[in-house]
Amino acid sequence: MKEFRTRFKLWLSTKDAEGVFGDGKWRLLKSIDAEGSLKAASQSLHISYRKAWGDLKKMQQCLNVPLVKKQRGGALGGQTALTEQGKKWVKAYTGFRTDIEKAVEKAYKKHIEELVK
Amino acid sequence: MKEFRTRFKLWLSTKDAEGVFGDGKWRLLKSIDAEGSLKAASQSLHISYRKAWGDLKKMQQCLNVPLVKKQRGGALGGQTALTEQGKKWVKAYTGFRTDIEKAVEKAYKKHIEELVK
DNA sequence: AACCGATATGTCGAGTAGTGCATAACCAAA
DNA sequence: TTTGGTTATGCACTACTCGACATATCGGTT
């Protein structure tokens, strides 16, 4: 009896660009919502600020939708928060991803499990 | 109305190794079955023989199951063919993957489509 | 006006996956 | 026994991603 773990990656692409939205960017948006700033979000996710910033930029450009409102300066230096659009995206993708997660588990049981026991 | 394409990657891991079986290795086995040799399979898939060989080796080691029978030498130089086990794996993973493919399409329609139209 | 901490962006280097040789080893058939 | 085409495997080089730095900019508070 082998012990396997199922793994999957999920993302969206357009004709022009690959990976415009996916697990990483989804986590980033969630973290921004929770932390209130891009810097704090990146630290919370243990990724570099440079990467978080780049991911966010790509997302915004490709989706062409204002997902976050950023502010520079101020006593706190600045902040980043999700727009309504951004929150909708997080919610939608969460549902999307959850469904797939369940489907993967179910399909594994159906097709693979018997094979490896 | 944006045009998105859903993308996903699917694979299996063990406690010891990541990616012991997945789309790439699945395609490799299928191609071996169709072509009759590792070399032809790699060419058919447009990957280097080096990689195909490495992938196959890893798969065999981690699954610890004889997926293919290889033969060196002979008039044709050698050949590689799937074992019964190998065929079963291909079949099982095909079903597994197909289910996920459908689930992704369905979940996309359910969760994302309305958001981007 | 000075300050402080976050956003904004380029660059260089490290780590990694994959490709391209190069070279054995193998063995049925001619 | 020579040959040919494949399996087998190491190694150097390449391409790409990401992280670490460095630096500039911004603007509400003090």
Image (cartoon, coloured by chain):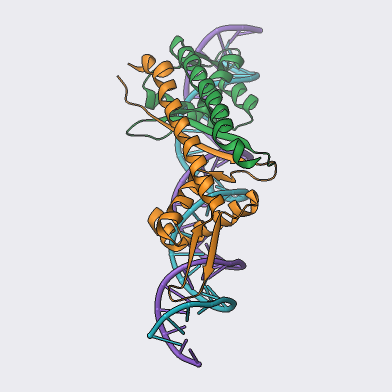
Chain colours: A green, B orange, C cyan, D purple
List x then y, in percent, for residue B94: 47, 40
Q: In this rendering, does residue A66 appear at all?
A: no
List x then y, in percent, for residue B25: 51, 48
Residue located 57% across and 37% down the image: A112
Q: Is residue A50 above or below residue B14?
A: above
Quadrant into which the C terminus of chain B falls:
top left
Q: Please give left or right for residue B43 compared with residue D11 in the image.
A: left
Q: In this rendering, does residue A32 appear at all?
A: yes
List x then y, in percent, for residue B93: 51, 40
* Residue with the most extreme front position: B84
Specify the quadrant of the image occupied by residue A1: top right
Which is nearer the eye, B112 or D19? Answer: B112
Quadrant into which the N terminus of chain B falls:
top left
**Number of numbered markers:** 0
Q: Is residue B109 above or below residue C11?
A: above
Residue located 43% across and 16% down the image: B111
Residue located 36% across and 17% down the image: B116
Which is nearer the eye, A44 or A7? Answer: A7
Q: Is residue D28 above or below residue A114?
A: above
Specify the quadrant of the image occupied by residue B55: bottom right
List x then y, in percent, for residue A39: 59, 24
Which is nearer the eye, A7 or A89? Answer: A7
Which is nearer the eye, D25 or B66? Answer: B66
